[in-house]
Amino acid sequence: MTDLTKLTLKGALDGLKAKQISSTELTEAFIGAIETANPALNAYVLTTFDKARGMAAESDKRIASGDARALEGAPLGIKDLFCTKDVRTTACSGILDNFIPPYESTVTQNLWDDGAVMLGKLNMDEFAMGSSNETSHWGPVTNPWKSNASNAALTPGGSSGGSASAVAADLCLAATASDTGGSIRQPAAFTGTVGIKPTYGRASRFGMVAFASSLDQAGPITKTVEDAAIMLQSMCSYDTKDSTSLKVDLPDFSSFVGKSVKGLRIGIPDEYRLDGIPAEIDALWEQGIAWLKDAGAEIVRISLPNTKYALPCYYIVAPAEASSNLARYDGMRFGHRTEAATGLTDTYELSRSEGFGKEVKRRIMIGTYVLSAGFYDAYYVKALKVRRRIAEDFTNAFNSCDVILTPATPSSAFELGDTAKAADPVAMYLNDVFTVTTNLAGLPGLSVPAGLDSKGLPLGLQVIGKALDEGTTLAIASVLEKAAGFTHKPSKWW
């Protein structure tokens, strides 16, 4: 095994178990790759190489003694949203630029308990608010993919852009990510990787820096569907420290990968055929339908009539919850505190003004507005009613189908600094048009790479499953993955 960084998570774990490679060798290979690529990609905002070497050495001892755990010796990247004990965690915001948590998030603790190795913290949009990873306090992430029509730097998507870029560029075996309105699936689609958001409550939110508490959900970005199943197995658990955590049995997710989908009903929603979507997106969707037909699945037309209200509903509910969650950052207890204040009010105002970025301030203002006395019923309460209708649409649709197939994104990766999107925030928000519905309904959603567009950039298909049915979602995705035969990788330019 010469190029260790190109291994899948499953391949690396098999090699470690067979003692063909050591965790130390694997970790050093990734450290070298990060040192080479990160100056150009900016995927990692903090590296923990000394810690990684120590964890790898411990894993090698456990493997040698026959005491290996599920992820023993596997080097991973961690999105900077997950609190890591004694390791700086900022959610890529200036207001948290000096925050070192005294505790560990449940998701990352699960990974360490299973023997994983931490390479460092991955870049993201500030407080997970963004679709291009350009709102980060630490600067934007660059997609390792390049268009064949231009040498311009492209977005890896957001908010989990650092996670997606690192996995696509082979700077970790897999990465943790989070999804509030598509922040796992959109970056995965833009980088030719696999991303899954499990059912809301499957993975604990304890120790995740909150954006919108009723929407946030942890999940992995990986190189393959099988790798996603492996990561999901470790990341998900019931947690008494999270009141929204679901106390349900955890199935063997890997057992669904490669499973026959014959007889399963695939729902195709009419409302996802939008005006102005590139023909290549629609063609890929039709190809995905054909692949599943060939695998023995039944195609069923369904309707999700309230889909058209999903984006405005999301951009009321999410900012409202963000406004409440981010009120805790006041310059008093932790995080950034201004040095220019002359009194208590100044401390609050200047600390928040200096610490928060432009997009976060925008969403706080929107959220505060819709929660204010004069507009609470007109906007927030109405949005909650629409959210209920969207969830009911899915419940009704699943009476006639087992999973739903849609495009993952309305385009391939666009250029960093796209002037149209920079000038009009709503244009940026439209990137979430295919993904926000699953967050509003709390359903599992997965993006699998399925082809390239005319510019040579990845495109993904999205599989939406029933609540707590990640297994069928993974089974469908593995059939699509096999049929697509997507083995493309970005040409190394860094």
Image (tube, rainbow, N blue to C red):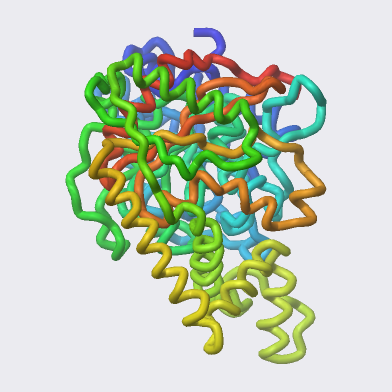
Image position, residue 394 (x, y; %): 33, 49
Front residue of 468/7: it is 468
Front residue of 332/241: it is 241
Image position, residue 299 (x, y; %): 33, 28
Image position, residue 194 (x, y; %): 47, 30
Q: Quadrant of residue 95?
A: bottom right
Q: Quadrant of residue 277?
A: top right
Q: Classify residue 259 as left or right of residue 3.
A: left
Q: Classify residue 174 as left or right of residue 361.
A: left
Q: Please say if 394 is above or below 62.
A: below
Q: Quadrant of residue 335?
A: bottom right
Q: Residue furthest top?
A: 1
Determine the residue positioned at 70% across, 82% down: 349
Q: Classify residue 398 as left or right of residue 433.
A: left
Q: Please say if 283 is above or below 397.
A: above
Determine the residue positioned at 37% across, 47% down: 109
Quadrant the C terminus occupies:
top right
Q: Residue furthest left?
A: 249
Q: Please say if 448 is above or below 110.
A: above
Image position, residue 129 (x, y; %): 60, 57
* Res. 20 visible in picture: yes
* Res. 76 visible in picture: no
Determine the residue positioned at 27% across, 37% down: 401
Determine the residue positioned at 54% across, 17% down: 6
Total labels: the figure holds 0
